Image (cartoon, helix red, strand yellow):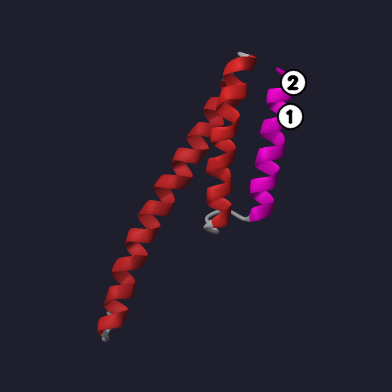
Amino acid sequence: MANHKSALKRIRSNEKRRVLNRYQHKTTRNAIKKLRELTDAKEAQAMLPTVVGMIDKLAKKNIIHSNKAGNLKSNLMKHVAAL
């Protein structure tokens, strides 16, 4: 167990961060799945900017790697363009 006040605080803040990161990552993954399941081009076009923004936020906060974010966005754009 941690001996210093600052170490105890770091443990608490890390746990808060971890929970928030997991929530944001899971929400984004669900949005990506929902977008991939869409068959209507107009709906997909409307949803794409929102999902891309979510992916960019994850990459900015280093929750996912920036290259992974680029790959996800590229594949989603291809999917929407093919509809």
Chief secondary structure of the magenta portion: helix
**Quick one: label 2, few (<14), some, or many (20+) residues within 10 Å?**
few
81 is within the stretch colored magenta: yes
Compared across the picture, whether 23 is left or right of 39 comes to left
- Decide: few, some or many residues near mark 1? Use Cα within 10 Å; few <14, some 14-19, many ≥20: few
Residue drawn at 53 percent across, 50 percent down: 58
Percent x, y of residue 64: 57, 53
Q: Name the residue under label 2.
A: 82
Q: Are marks 1 and 2 in contact (CB under 8 Å)?
A: yes
Query: Would residue 57 be counted in the magenta stretch?
Result: no
Regarding mark 1 in the picture, which secondary structure is present there? helix
In the image, what residue occupies the spot 50% across and 32% down? 31
Q: Which amino acid does label 1 sit on?
A: Lys
Question: At 70% across and 31% down in the image, what residue appears?
Answer: 77
> Which portion, as a residue range, is magenta?
66-83
* Residue 6 pos. (x, y %): 30, 81
Say which quarter of the image contains residue 17: bottom left
- Which residue carries the number 1 mark? 78
Amino acid type of the residue that numbered disc 2 sits on in the rendered structure:
Ala
Give coordinates of residue 53: x percent, y percent.
Answer: 56, 41
- Which element type, helix, strand or loop, lies under badge 2? helix
